[in-house]
């Protein structure tokens, strides 16, 4: 039995050392001490109390401050006190705030007020209202006797009470009709008692009790530290408790467990509080939860219509409160509604029989720690308080002792060295604890550049909490170009080290940082450039701009270097000129100068039209009594698009008598490369100044005027130009042709033209007809309907005639100088077909039918040229001397000779006919054949050649006499048959040679 007990004790001690997560740190500096206590892991959410010498006066009780590191302030946090503003924000249907007196063993215990009671205070200082059935937790530190009274009224001397007397080893319960002034007889007569073998009360520990009175009229006192009911009494004549009262004979500290909770009895789904703003990348909400033994509670949020469960709890036995966390890592939202569902597990409860409660809701951090500070209002020497009498403890297990760290000197936080990078910050400081037992708590949070929504979620959620026991720390995964609030705290220092650190900017601007929605607003000589300011959500560094306006043709460059604004005006530009706008963006001027880590945006624009330049080459090219015609060129640099022309005519004798007319700019009908303007309805015989000015498109003013002067009187028109002719409509059934004469309108018109006169003078002095010697015709021009080119046809012009053409421009008073041209009509032979007819051919002979000489011709010549196909032989030079023959050879090689020339002459007119024939290959020669046989066919051919001319001449003579006789009786023309009508099928069929060519 003894071995078992020892083993249990050893196991208990080992368990204490293994599970305690409290660190007590004592800083001493002379007569000053600074106690602090750090709770980690599960002890963060347990009740932690301080033990220190109890003062003799309420004013000397030290101040206790408890906080979580990091401290996260959020409107979602709420402790559900009836006096707290957050309770209003958390208003939910069927949920209520109600006071609870259940025993508290969690962090809410630390918020309970500490009550100081001593023999110098009022006898009954604390009166706690209670219901008839109640359960109340009490924590106390006392060295002597304490008294707890449960009375029917507020004054124990006038109302009956249950009386608990608790000293170091005994507990007594007694019932009084009225409390006597002297209660020393308690030990003589009592209802029940409890005897302990260890001290029930202690000045060095918080002792905890639960006093309850149930519906069975049972009064109970439960010792939480012993986890045992020490007093239990059922009263047959029960009282009706209304107040709980406490007092002590010596100085003592009390905590009465009264706390407001947020609860419901309804099974339902509700929105859990207001909208939650998430300022970190992870969602973490800490809260205390309890349910009835047959109930469960579910926390969730919605993504669209889908439920995402955060936590499911229940059932919880004996009304136990559980600290729980609602967590989601890397949550993509910056705002969120959390929902809660309360429901019975087995479905046996109706809608209002359950119980679900929450309390102490706050936004948390997964790695947070709880730190409690004890601050005395006096020095050690004043009251002889030693550091050994001070410590912190877990309320549920006061016998457990924290780890003690003691430091003799209290100094300020050492200087922190900072090394920034684009996405990280390195912190280091002088080492303070060689054993590395002190924890440094570092909280960092990014500041968003956006002061209003929408925010940059990367910056909003960038932050965290890091704990280290070393003297250096690396914060990584940060956002570039962001100011971070960094707080380094430790219990060694009363003051925290607060730093504001900028991460470095990115090397090169991102696409979102480049100029977007660029507006280019040009005027005549300036351009206004602006773009949208970079959104704060996209800015990751400084932005430096260089704006350049370039025109290579003008060798023009204007720069605005190293600018930071997003709007500029650039002047001294040329009107109506194309420019290139170049906006270069970089982080620094050095990058722009070196052309690295920069981006450029190129845009082309044109300045607006300016005042139009003056016209060039202005001419008054024509004028008469009532009108004037002006011709001009547009300026080479018009400063815009010329749209309108204004002509102002002013009488030279009186400049006040001026009239203006404005018209659209039009090209001259006669000279498309020129521009013309016409002035009508002006006074005759007046000397006028004509002032011409232009106005550009989208401008308001006319430009500089150019003047010419003219006198309104008819003038001699200019002579026609570019006179040409063409003989047309020549046919073989008539003796005449038509003559088309073409000319251009005179460029120097000078005066109005109403007609053109055409005169043909024959050069043949022996013409019998006067009509053939002199021809005159007039081309009328009505209402100045001028044309660039005129064409007029003179009909019935004889063949083979030579004329001198005179062409004049004329108006009602004047005629121009003559434009003269020598005109020669066609030879009639060019229009009469005298082609011979191929009758037949043999291996060595061509037979032609020669046509009769047309009556309108004096002669023609028939020439027969023969060529072979010897490609190794060139054409003889004597043949090529005849140009007509040389022009119409079958090919430019082979043996070539003129076989026959027949000339039928009245006048000389040549007709050349050519035919390509391929003779068959000759059979091989036979040496035995007689030479006389070889030349027999030549004699026959010679005879035919002699007979054919003689026969032809006889036939010609007889034929001519018959034609003359018939022509007198019938004047109509007589035609022979066309050549080749009777062509043999074996004749040559190469179409390229079956042609009649005229010369």
Image (tube, rainbow, N blue to C red):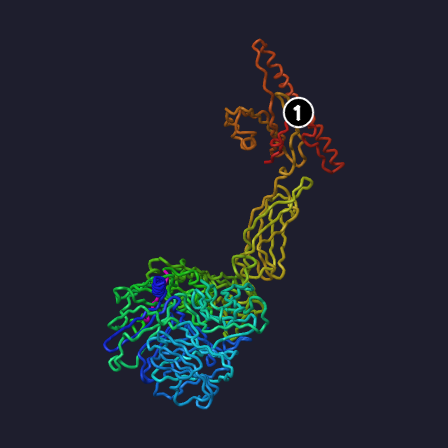
* Residue 587 seen anywhere in this rendered image of the structure: no
- Which quadrant: the N terminus? bottom left
Q: Nearer the viewer, residue 778 or 722?
A: 722
Location of residue 45 in the rendering, given as x and y in whole percent from the top left corner: 41, 70
How packed mark 1 is, by other alpha carbons closer than 10 Å (few <14, some 14-19, many 20 or more), is few
Looking at the image, the residue that sits furthest to the front is: 188
Vertical order, 552 against 865 (above or below): below
Report x, y in % for residue 927.
56, 10
Q: Which residue is mark 1?
A: 986
- Residue 680 on image: x %, y %: 58, 67
Q: Left of 295 or right of it: where is 766?
A: right
Q: Is residue 776 magenta?
A: no
- Decide which of 969, 793 is in the foreground and name it: 793
Q: Residue furthest left?
A: 30
Find out whether residue 498 is within the magenta segment: yes
Quadrant hosting residue 588: bottom left
Left or right, 178 with respect to 858, comes to left
Residue 896 visible (yes or no) = yes
Q: Give the prevailing secondary structure in the magenta stretch.
A: strand
Q: Taking 511 as reference, is 975 above or below it?
A: above
Q: Secondary structure at mark 1?
A: loop
Q: Quadrant of the C terminus?
A: top right
Q: Which residues are magenta?
A: 497-506
- Residue at the right extreme? 969
Most foreground residue, 716 or 439? 439
What percent of the width, then of the height, locates residue 848? 65, 26
The mark total stands at 1
């Amino acid at each position: 039995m003894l071995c078992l007990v020892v083993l249990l004790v050893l196991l208990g001690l080992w368990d204490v050392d293994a599970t305690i997560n409290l660190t007590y740190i004592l800083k001493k500096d002379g007569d000053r001490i600074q106690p602090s206590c750090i709770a980690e892991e599960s002890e963060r959410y347990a009740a932690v109390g301080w033990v220190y010498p109890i003062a003799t006066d309420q004013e000397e009780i030290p101040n206790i401050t408890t906080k979580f590191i990091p401290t996260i302030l959020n409107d979602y946090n709420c402790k559900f006190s009836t006096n707290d503003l957050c309770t209003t924000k958390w208003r939910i249907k069927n949920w209520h705030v109600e006071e609870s007196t259940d025993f508290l063993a969690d962090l809410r215990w630390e918020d309970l007020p500490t009550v100081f009671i001593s023999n110098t205070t009022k006898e009954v200082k604390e009166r706690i209202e209670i219901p008839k059935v109640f359960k109340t937790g009490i924590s106390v530190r006392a060295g002597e006797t304490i008294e707890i009274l449960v009375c029917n009224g507020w004054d124990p001397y006038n109302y009956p009470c249950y009386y608990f007397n608790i000293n170091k080893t005994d507990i007594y319960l007694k019932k009084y009709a009225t409390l006597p002034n002297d209660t020393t007889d308690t030990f003589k007569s009592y209802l029940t008692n409890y005897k302990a073998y260890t001290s029930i009360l202690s000045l060095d520990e918080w002792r905890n009790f639960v006093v309850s009175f149930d519906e069975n009229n049972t009064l109970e006192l439960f010792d939480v530290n012993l986890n045992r009911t020490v007093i239990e009494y059922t009263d047959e004549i029960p009282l009706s408790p209304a107040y709980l009262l406490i007092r002590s004979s010596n100085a003592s500290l009390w905590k009465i467990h009264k706390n407001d909770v947020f609860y419901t009895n309804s099974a339902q789904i509700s929105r859990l509080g207001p909208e939650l703003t998430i300022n970190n990348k992870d969602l973490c909400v800490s809260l205390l939860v309890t349910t009835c033994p047959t109930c469960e509670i579910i926390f969730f949020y919605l993504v669209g219509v889908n439920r995402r469960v955060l936590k499911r709890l229940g059932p919880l036995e004996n009304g136990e409160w559980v600290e729980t966390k609602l967590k989601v890592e890397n949550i993509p939202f910056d705002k969120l509604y959390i929902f809660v569902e309360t429901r019975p597990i087995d479905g046996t409860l109706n809608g209002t029989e359950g119980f679900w409660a929450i309390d102490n809701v706050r936004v948390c951090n997964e790695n947070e720690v709880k730190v409690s500070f004890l601050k005395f209002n006096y020095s050690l020497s004043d009251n002889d308080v030693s550091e050994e009498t001070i410590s912190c403890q877990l309320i549920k297990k006061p016998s457990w002792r924290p780890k003690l760290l003691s430091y003799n000197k209290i100094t300020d936080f050492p200087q922190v060295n900072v090394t920034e990078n684009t996405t990280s910050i390195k912190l280091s400081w002088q080492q303070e604890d060689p054993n590395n037992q002190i924890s440094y708590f570092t909280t960092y949070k990014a500041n968003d550049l956006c002061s209003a929504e929408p925010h940059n979620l990367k910056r909003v959620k960038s932050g965290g909490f890091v704990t280290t026991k070393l003297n250096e720390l690396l914060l990584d995964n940060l956002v570039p170009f962001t100011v971070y609030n960094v707080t380094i705290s430790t219990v060694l220092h009363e003051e925290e080290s607060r730093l504001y650190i900028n991460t470095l900017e990115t090397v090169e601007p991102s696409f979102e940082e480049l100029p977007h929605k660029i507006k280019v607003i040009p005027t005549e000589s300036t351009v206004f450039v602006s773009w949208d300011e970079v959104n704060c959500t996209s800015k990751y560094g400084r932005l430096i701009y260089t704006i350049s306006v370039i025109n290579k043709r003008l060798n023009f460059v204007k720069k605005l270097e190293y600018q930071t604004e997003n709007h500029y005006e650039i002047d001294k530009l040329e009107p109506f000129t194309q420019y290139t706008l170049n906006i270069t963006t970089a982080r620094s001027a050095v990058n722009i100068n070196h052309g690295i880590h920069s981006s450029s945006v190129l845009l082309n624009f044109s300045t607006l039209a300016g005042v139009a330049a003056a016209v060039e080459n202005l001419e008054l090219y024509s004028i008469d009594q009532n009108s004037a015609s002006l011709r001009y060129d547009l300026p080479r640099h018009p400063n815009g698009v010329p749209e309108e022309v204004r002509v102002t005519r002013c009488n030279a004798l009186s400049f006040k008598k001026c009239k203006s007319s404005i018209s659209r700019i039009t090209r001259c009908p006669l000279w498309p490369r020129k521009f013309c303007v016409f002035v009508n309805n002006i006074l005759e015989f007046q000397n006028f100044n004509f002032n011409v000015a232009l106005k550009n498109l989208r401008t308001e003013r006319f430009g500089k005027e150019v003047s010419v002067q003219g006198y309104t009187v008819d003038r001699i028109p200019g002579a026609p130009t570019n006179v040409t002719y063409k003989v047309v409509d020549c046919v073989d059934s008539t003796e005449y042709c038509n003559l088309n004469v073409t000319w251009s309108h005179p460029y120097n018109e000078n005066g109005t033209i109403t007609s053109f006169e055409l005169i043909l003078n024959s050069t043949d002095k022996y013409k019998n007809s006067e009509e053939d010697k002199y021809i005159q015709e007039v081309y009328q021009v009505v209402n100045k309907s001028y044309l660039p080119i005129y064409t007029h046809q003179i009909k019935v012009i004889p063949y083979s005639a030579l004329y001198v053409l005179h062409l004049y421009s004329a108006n009602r008073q004047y005629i121009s100088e003559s434009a003269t041209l020598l005109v020669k009509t066609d030879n009639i032979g060019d229009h009469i077909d005298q082609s011979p007819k191929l009758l037949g051919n043999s291996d060595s002979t061509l037979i032609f039918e020669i046509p009769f000489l047309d009556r309108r011709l004096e002669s023609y010549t028939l020439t027969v040229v023969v060529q072979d196909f010897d490609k190794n032989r060139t054409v003889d030079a004597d043949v090529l001397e005849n140009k007509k023959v040389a022009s119409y050879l079958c090919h430019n090689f082979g043996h070539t000779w003129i076989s026959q020339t027949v000339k039928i002459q009245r006048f000389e007119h040549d007709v050349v006919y050519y035919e390509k024939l391929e003779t068959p290959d000759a059979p091989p020669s036979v040496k035995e054949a007689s030479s006389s046989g070889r030349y027999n066919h030549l004699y026959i051919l010679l005879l035919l050649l002699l007979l054919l001319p003689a026969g032809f001449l006889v036939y010609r003579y007889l034929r001519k006499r018959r034609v003359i006789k018939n022509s007198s009786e019938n004047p109509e023309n007589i035609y022979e048959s066309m050549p080749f009508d009777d062509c043999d099928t074996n004749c040559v069929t190469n179409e390229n040679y079956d042609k009649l060519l005229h010369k």
